[in-house]
Amino acid sequence: MPRKVTYTVGRAGGPTREITVDVHDLDVDPWGADAELRVVGTDVPRLEASQKTTGAARYTYDVNRPNMALCRLLRSPHAHATVRSVDTSRAERLRGVLGVNVLVPAGGRITFAGKGVVAVCAENEETLDDALHAIDVSYDVTGGPVTTDDGRAPGAERVDPKRDNVNAGGRRGRQERGDPQAAMAAAATKVSATFRTQVQTHSALETHGCVVEHHDDGTYTVWASTQGTNAFRGSMAQTLGVPADRVRVITEHMGGGFGAKLGAIDEWDRAAAFFARDLMRPVKAMLLRRAEHQVAGCRPDSIQELSMACDGDGKITALSGTTHGTAGNGRGGAGAANTRIYRIPNLAMEQVTVSTFTGRARAFRAPGHPQGVFALEGIVDALAIAAGIDPLEFRLRNDPHPLRQVQWRLGAERMEWDRKRREFPGTGAVRRGVCCAAAVWRQKGGGDYVVNLEIRSDGSVTVKNAVQDIGTGTRTVLAVLVAEELGIAPEQVTVRIGDTQYPAGPSSGGSTTAPSIGPAAREAGHHARLRMAELLAEDWSCKPGEVRLDGVRFAGPGGKSATWGEACSLIDKSGLSVSGQRRKNYGGFSGETAGCQFAQVAVDTETGVIRVERVVAVHDAGRIVDTLTARSQVVGGVIQGISYALHEDRQLDRNLGDMVNPTFDTYRILGIGDTPRIDCLLTTLDSGFNNAGMMGLGEPVTVPTAGAVANAVSHAIGVRMTEIPITPARVLAALGGVR
């Protein structure tokens, strides 16, 4: 039967509140805000750190099976065309070519550059290259819109002949409340602006791909660079026409995934699977970097036309506008999250998706939020200045989140806001600016995932679940939670994940991973501790309830005591096995994580070059389990956000639709030399939603960065920057009218 538990949620020292929840009879009591913990909340190095720094970690790209063949796709160079003919005869005659499959036959329609037309399997890379060059495909090229502006133009060629490009993905997204028109008319101050953001490709270090091996018994083993081992297994099994339990998916390590590697398999995975099935030998298909940029997913662009108003006290009264964006040739949404964070009593917002002849968008670290917050924070900053109110003070007056009220002040103090807003931008060619933006995300985790835990008589502890670590430190988080319950060090815990032979885990996306699987690990540790107490109680001839864990030792009546090793020696040769389950969410402090960032920039007004000199990032994610891993997440998110603000931009040939900068020497991302000083302030609190008080962190840390950087540049040069990436050319163009 559930039991009532009362505890304090929030941040020790405030803001806090007391709640009473029904806790499952198998779950451990939740930690409150005042919990005193031993290893949770400390700096714990990654368990796999030595493997990754020495090169011992094995990624999908590193998998090479005996007698393995290679697979790659011949891709269309045209965005919109009809295949007139396909001649594969020369390729098929080449020695070493094992198979050729036509994916788009004569008469088939192409709707984006990079679409796979023919799949080829060969013995080695050289033969594969020769075969792809030997295939002759002729096209009737039609052309069509590849940008949002062109896609929504009257009379534009339709991506789907049966649907208009505008809202081809479904109904318009509308948000309405109050009377924004009347509020605008009565406002003391109002501003309007159009903000633009670019298409950003994922650029993960390891490209998409897999290795498929068909065994004699009809089962398959698949090594995949995927964010969801179980989802990938289900999709692969369906493709091959076999039950899911006939397919094993392994993702031991992966070189990054920001959302594009979630969910179902892709055309290159299917091609590898079919070749492996038919040839009865392992087949490897990994995307080349050009294809990764072209077809592996991207963040949609946006055109956000916004108007905002406030009253004489600097309180926001209304926001209205329309957002257009392209999700490529798919039906996914391209909205921008530009209505959250601040208190907006009167609202009218319309989100419009535009289809174009480009590769489809996919989930990308906080979908919709970096572009939406860039525009929202830009219009908020412009309104504050127009109203004659300090931009930070304006945000404090309009932000209802109790923790972010604390975070704004912490960040401002660390950045020396008051002094720098007085002294900047300064005089001379190089001008400095400082400004800020808020972060927001909702992720409490969920699901009924199970973690298995085994203890051997030698003291070894093993944790198992199929969840994969995409670089966020999942192994270490699970080890810390188990170690806290058992009174041992995290490095004494072996964590085996990324294999569908283990209990199913959540896909790693949406900042769901840690808060979805962590509570199950803690419960498993709790059950293991109770079992250890039973063994000791039998040995000490006392009741299990009389055995307690006192720090790192077990203690009992009459001064009895045992180390971890001594207690484990009581375990028989079969070992001790328990499991923990993720329970339903309890009540909590706030359904949203909070955060804000402050950016300081230097702008050379003669060259237009921007250098981000410093970022102060203040974030919460409920209870922080491993502060070292959490800071790493924050730093990585800030770096990605700066890269989005200043550099990354998919460039397409407007006629052919092909990407003209699909390499890292032409598609620039932030480098080490461009990375600023990043101060990370973690405002840990107990969220209350699960036994560990955890929430997600991966996404919110990249949400505010572009907005903070753009606002800082605007402060430095005295001109509102409304389009990213903020290139030197755009800075000089903005300065053209004021210098």
Image (cartoon, rainbow, N blue to C red):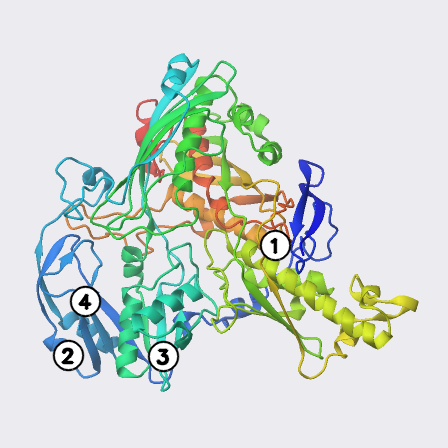
State the quadrant of the N terminus. Answer: bottom right
In front: mark 3 or mark 1? 3
Query: Mark 3 sits on what residue?
Result: 213
Please report the residue visible at 21 percent of the width from the left and 78 percent of the height from the top.
99
State the quadrant of the C terminus. Answer: top left
Query: Mark 4 sits on what residue?
Result: 103
Picture quadrant of residue 372: top left
Q: How many C-alpha atoms fall within 10 Å of the one at disc 1: few (<14), some, or many (≥20)?
A: some
Does residue 436 appear in the picture of this structure?
A: yes
Please report the residue visible at 82 percent of the width from the left and 66 percent of the height from the top.
547
- Does residue 734 appear to the left or right of 155 in the view shown? right
In front: mark 4 or mark 1? 4
In front: mark 2 or mark 4? 4
Using the numbered discs, state the Cα–Cα distance from disc 2 to disc 4 in whole angstroms: 15 Å
**Residues under numbered marks 3 and 4 in contact, where contact means CB atoms less than 8 Å apart:** no
**Residues under numbered marks 2 and 4 in contact, where contact means CB atoms less than 8 Å apart:** no
Say which of 268 and 57 sits in front.
Answer: 268
- Does residue 205 appear to the left or right of 586 in the view shown? left
Query: Mark 2 sits on what residue?
Result: 92
